[in-house]
Amino acid sequence: MKTWIKRTFFGLAGAALLVGGLAACGHRMHHGWSSNATPEQAAEWRGKMVERIAGKLDLNAEQKTKLTTLGEKLHAQRQALRGQTDPRAEVKALFASDKFDRAKAQALVQQKTDIVRTGSPEVIAALGDFYDSLTPEQQQKVREFMERRRGWRRGG
């Protein structure tokens, strides 16, 4: 795999891990969490996420603004990846006939890869702007949190 693709994927994964991990500090939201949330619910959830993270890291107004921008970029990237159609329906359509539709599957992968490739520089820039605006103590809190949450999907 090309170096720039690896960096893009690691950067995007790091951004998602940072924001998702920090947002998971508090309790799980009941509204605005699902993919069927209205834009108002999603914006409300992002606002609560920013406030929660701001409280944990003692962010100033400028840092909150950068975190808000990061959240908006991540949301836009997620919406672009999801697209206008149901992702599950797209995958189910690959198996609709007696033969697996390889061309359609390859086109779907290419489409999603192109979305990540074009959107990730903005997400990475927003993540970098936010992280670079943190004080060394705040950055250390982020690193410690990420270390504690290592392996959270494996139940560890």
Image (tube, rainbow, N blue to C red):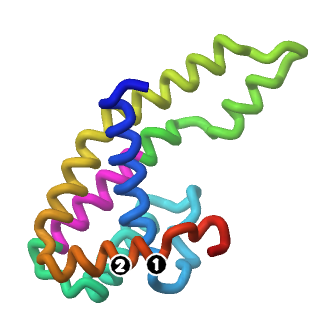
> Could you tell me which residue is drawn at 85 percent across and 13 percent down?
99
Secondary-structure class at tag 1: helix
Query: Which quadrant is the C terminus positioned in?
Result: bottom right
Taking 123 as reference, is 99 left or right?
A: right
Query: Which quadrant is the N terminus positioned in?
Result: top left
Tell whether position 65 is magenta.
Answer: yes
Residue 131 circle label: none
According to the picture, the residue beneath numbered tag 2 turns out to be 144
According to the picture, the residue beneath numbered tag 1 turns out to be 148
Cβ–Cβ under 8 Å for marks 2 and 1: yes
Label 2 sits on what residue type? Glu
Taking 8 as reference, is 28 left or right?
A: right
> Could you tell me which residue is drawn at 37 percent across and 31 percent down?
5
137, above or below 120, in the image: below
Which of the two residues, 20 or 39, is positioned nearer the viewer here?
A: 20
Label 1 sits on what residue type? Arg
Which of the two residues, 101 or 82, is positioned nearer the viewer here?
A: 101
Where's residue 72, x and y in %? Answer: 30, 57
Tell whether position 4 is magenta.
Answer: no
> Could you tell me which residue is drawn at 35 percent across and 78 percent down?
144
Q: In which quarter of the image is residue 119?
A: top left
Secondary-structure class at tag 2: helix
Segment tinted magenta in the rendering = 64-77
Marks 2 and 1 sit apart, C-alpha to C-alpha, by 6 Å
Which of the two residues, 156 or 72, is positioned nearer the viewer here?
A: 156
> Could you tell me which residue is drawn at 30 percent across and 52 percent down?
73
Taking 61 as reference, is 24 left or right?
A: right
